[in-house]
Image (cartoon, rainbow, N blue to C red):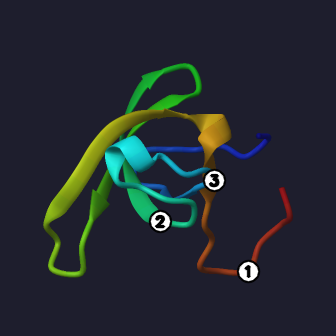
Amino acid sequence: MDETIEILSVVALMEDLPERGLYRGQVGTVVESLATDVFEVEFSDNEGRTYALLALEAEKLMTLRHEPGEVA
């Protein structure tokens, strides 16, 4: 993807990962940059409890935006 993903970016999963209990559209937060285009993403419930923490390639993530801006 052409989007820049940074630490604390809010992202959505672009594909199902049933072996991890995660599905397309689930929202997480980038907590670490592990390598070029590989990020550790934390998925938490509404109470703030982490239910998954895993390394994902940028191509499996979509950055979510909360404010108007330029189209990537």
Q: Position of residue 58 (x, y in %)?
A: 61, 36
- Give the secondary structure at mark 2: loop
Label 1 vs label 2: CA separation? 22 Å
Binning the other alpha carbons within 10 Å of mark 1 as few (below 14), some (14 to 19) or many (20 upward) gives few
Q: Quadrant of the N terminus?
A: top right
- Determine the residue positioned at 57% across, 60% down: 24
Q: Nearer the viewer, residue 4 or 55?
A: 55
User: Is 69 above or below relative to 72?
Assistant: below
Q: Which residue is mark 3?
A: 14
Binning the other alpha carbons within 10 Å of mark 2 as few (below 14), some (14 to 19) or many (20 upward) gives some
Label 3 vs label 2: CA separation? 8 Å
Check if mark 3's residue and mark 2's residue have beta carbons within 8 Å. Answer: no
Tell me, yes or no, if residue 41 can be seen here.
no
- Determine the residue positioned at 51% across, 44% down: 6
Amino acid type indicated by mark 2: Gln
Q: Position of residue 72 (x, y in %)?
A: 83, 55
Q: Which residue is mark 2?
A: 26
Residue 20 sits in quarter: top left
Q: Which residue is mark 1?
A: 68
Residue 71 sits in quarter: bottom right
Tell me, yes or no, if residue 14 can be seen here.
yes
Mark 1 or mark 2, whichever is nearer to me: 2
Amino acid type indicated by mark 1: Pro
Q: Nearer the viewer, residue 42 or 72?
A: 42
Check if mark 3's residue and mark 1's residue have beta carbons within 8 Å. Answer: no
Q: Earlier in the sequence, mark 1 or mark 2?
A: 2
Check if mark 1's residue and mark 2's residue have beta carbons within 8 Å. Answer: no
Q: Farthest residue to the top: give it.
A: 35
Q: Nearer the viewer, residue 36 or 17?
A: 17
How many numbered discs, if any? 3
Q: Position of residue 53 (x, y in %)?
A: 27, 44
Q: Earlier in the sequence, mark 3 or mark 2?
A: 3
